[in-house]
Amino acid sequence: MGSIATILFAHKLGTALEPECKMYRLLADVFNDIAMVLDCFSPALPKVPRVILLSASSVLRALCGVAAGSSKASLSAHFAKWGNLGELNAKDSSQETIISLLGMLAGSVVVSYVKSPIATWSWLILLLSIHLAMNHAAVRAVSMHTLNRQRANIVLSTMLDQRKVLTPGEVSLQERIFERDGVLRWCGTRIIGKAVIGVSLKGVIGFLGQPHRVTSSVRSPSISLERLVSIFQEEEYLLWYERSRHLALIVVKSKASPQSQLKAWSHALLMAQLQASEDRAGANAKSMDEETLRRLQETLKQISIRWGQSLVALEASGWDLNTASLETSSSSRICQRRTTASHGIDE
C-alpha cells in the first residue's frame, strides 16, 4: 500500500511540491503524526479493522516520505546561499542525529512516569501538539524568494493597488501555510476569483463556444479566436476571463519566460479585481464576450506600461524572477505562427 501511495502521490502532486514546499513540509509532519496515532490505537481493535488501520498508517508514512524529502530539498536549496548544499545537508544530518539522541534520553526519563493508558495518550497528544506547533512556527519563519501563486497574489496585488513592492520578509508575515489552489486574493485578504495557468487552447474554446447537449461538440464561438489571439500577439501568453464564473484561463505559449507567466497572473488578478469591484457596486455584470475582450485589451495596456519598471523593482526587493513557480500541475503549451495558433502539448 505504501509503495503504491508513493507512486500515485508523486505522479499527482509532483509538480506542486517545489512551489508549495512550505505547505508540504508541514503536511509531512501532519501525515507522520497521524500515522503514529493510528499505530498506537491499532492494538485496541479486532484483526480486520487493525489491518485496515495499519494499512492507512503505512500510506500516511509513505506520503510523509515523499512530501518531506522533496520539500526538504527545496528548502535546502533556498538556504544554500553560496552553493554549499553538500555542507548544509551534512550539518543538517548531524543536527538531526543530536536531536534524536536527546529525544531518546528524554524519552527514557518520561517513560518511567507513564504507567496508565490515560497518561500514555495524554503525553502522546501533548508531545505531538508541541511537535506540530514548533514545525508550524519554523515553516512560517522561512521567507522564500520565489513567487508561487499565493506570494504572487500578495506582491502583485499590493503593487497594483498601492504602487508598493513588498519584500520576501514582509510577504512571509502575510502568507498562509495552507492555501486553496488557484485562488486570486487581493492584497492577501478576500478571494476575488480563481485562475488556472497552463490550460489547453481547447479549454478556452470550450468557454468561448457553448457545447452541444447531445454530441458535446463545441459550437462556433460568439467571438473570433483570432481576435483574442491578436490582442496577445506580442505576449507570451493568452488570457480569457470568464466573468460569470470569476475564472481566469491562462494559456501559456511555448518558450514563455517566468516573467511572462508572472505578467499573465498579474493580468488575471487585475481582471478579477475589476469584476469584484463591479459586483460590490451592484453594476450590471452581463457576461458579454465583446466587453470582456475590450477589458482584456485595456488592462493589458495598463500592465504593460509599467511592467518593465515593476520587474526591476521586484528584483531590487530580493525576488527571484527566473524560477517559474506558478504551475502546480502538468500543463499545456501552444505554438503561435503569425495570426494562427496551433496547439501542442509539452508534458
Image: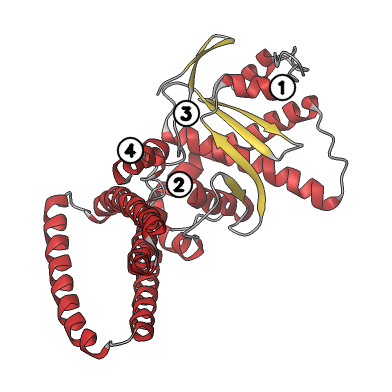
Q: Quadrant of the N terminus?
A: top left
Cα separation between marks 3 and 2: 16 Å
Q: Name the kind of residue labelled 4 in the image.
A: Ile
Q: Is residue 202 left or right of residue 48?
A: right
Cα separation between marks 4 and 2: 25 Å
Which of the 4 image quarters holds residue 211? top right
Q: Is residue 164 left or right of residue 21?
A: right
Residue wearing tag 4: 7
- Number of marks in the image? 4
Mark 4 Cα shell of 10 Å, populated few (<14), some (14-19), many (≥20): some
Q: Earlier in the sequence, mark 4 or mark 3?
A: 4
Of helix, strand and loop, which one carries label 3?
Answer: loop
Q: Name the kind of residue labelled 1 in the image.
A: Leu
Q: Is residue 218 left or right of residue 13?
A: right
Compared with residue 117, is residue 49 higher up or lower down, i.e. above or below?
Answer: above
Compared with residue 258, is residue 233 higher up or lower down, i.e. above or below?
Answer: above
Of helix, strand and loop, which one carries label 2?
Answer: loop
Mark 1 Cα shell of 10 Å, populated few (<14), some (14-19), many (≥20): many
Cα separation between marks 4 and 1: 37 Å
Q: Quadrant of the C terminus?
A: top left
Mark 3 Cα shell of 10 Å, populated few (<14), some (14-19), many (≥20): some
Residue wearing tag 2: 148
Compared with residue 103, is residue 265 higher up or lower down, i.e. above or below?
Answer: above
Q: Earlier in the sequence, mark 2 or mark 1?
A: 2
Identify the disc placed on residue 208: 1
Tell me where residue 244 appears, x and y as whole percent.
Answer: 77, 37
Identify the disc placed on residue 331: 3
Q: Earlier in the sequence, mark 1 or mark 3?
A: 1
Cα separation between marks 1 and 3: 20 Å
